[in-house]
Structures are given as C-alpha cells and as structure tokens.
Image (spheres, rainbow, N blue to C red):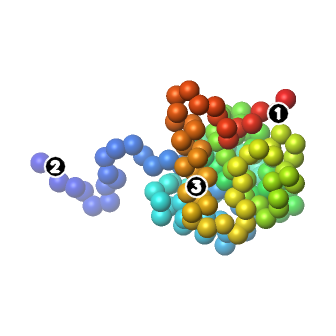
Amino acid sequence: MNEKIPGELPAGPPPRCVLVVEDEMLVAMMLEGMLTDIGYRVIKAARVAKAIGLAATEAIDFAVLDVNLAGEASYPVADELRRRGIPFAFASGYAPDSLRAGYRDTPMLRKPFGPQDVQRVLTNAFQSRDQPSGPNHTIPRNE
C-alpha cells in the first residue's frame, strides 16, 4: 500500500538551500518568505561569526549576503563561500562599485528588491552552475 503519511515529505530531491545573511529582521523575514514561496529551504544568520560557521559546514546551494552586518562587513563569509565553490549574491542599498575589489562582479540585489529580483539572481546562478561547460560567473576570483 502506498498511503501518504501526514507530514511526510514528497519523494524526490530535497529543495535547494539558501543561506540568508541579514541583520535587519524584517528584511530577513521578507527574503525568507520570498524564497520559501518559490520552493527553497532557508537558513539564516544575522552576524558574521555565525554566518561563517554556517557557510563552512552546511549543505548550502546559494547565499544572499547583506554587505554590512551591524557595522561588520560580510566579506569573510563571502571568502568562505568562494572557498567552498558556493555561488552567492550581495544584498545592499549601495552601488556595486562600492563593493571591495574582487567582489564588484558579484551579483547584487539592490535594496529594496522584490520577488522577481530574487528569482532572477537565483535562476542566473543555477543556470550557469548547472551547465556542464559554462564558467562559474558568480564566483569571481581574487587575483
């Protein structure tokens, strides 16, 4: 018998996981809602130290990093994501040219952003990542 058990997860691959690194609770909740609405699993961090720990140990498929977390830049988190080959985007109200050298080509969600912006960044990242011969454009290397 193939009866569905209440609360049982559907068969198939688990949803992709997105790490949201954001210190503004309302923005983090809004982004989490956008991501879960389109089928992603979300883990969150509001501080750099916790985000580095998650970036180093969790099975993450993508990350969205607020550039400024309570006065601390999120570049150490970005460095760890790069080390692991995990694509990411920054979220900021600042212009892309305000990013640290070596990160200016990283995708950016300009605040305020909407669901279409989030979907576009994710689609671009996963299309590039899933293509067998395409470059990994979301992870520019420091040289």
Q: Which residue in the structure is indicated by mark 3? A: 120
Q: Amino acid at mark 1?
A: Asn
Q: Which residue in the structure is indicated by mark 1? A: 142
The numbered mark, 2 or 3, whose residue comes first in the sequence reads 2
The numbered mark, 1 or 3, whose residue comes first in the sequence reads 3
Quick one: label 2, few (<14), some, or many (20+) residues within 10 Å?
few
**Residue positioned 67% across, 53% down in the render:** 64
Q: Which residue in the structure is indicated by mark 2? A: 2
Across and down, in percent, residue 110 comes to: 73, 62
Across and down, in percent, residue 47 comes to: 76, 57
Question: In front of the other: label 1 or label 3?
Answer: 3
**Residue positioned 16% across, 49% down in the render:** 2
Question: In front of the other: label 2 or label 3?
Answer: 3
How many numbered circles are shown? Answer: 3
SS for dot 2: loop
Instruction: Give residue 96's mark.
Output: none
Q: Amino acid at mark 2?
A: Asn
**Residue positioned 64% across, 39% down in the render:** 86
**Residue positioned 82% across, 33% down in the render:** 142
Residue 93 in sight in this render? yes
Residue 88 shown left or right of residue 43 in the figure: right
Q: CA distance from mark 2 to mark 3?
A: 38 Å
> Residue pushed farthest top?
133
Residue 18 in sight in this render? no
Q: Quadrant of the C terminus?
A: top right
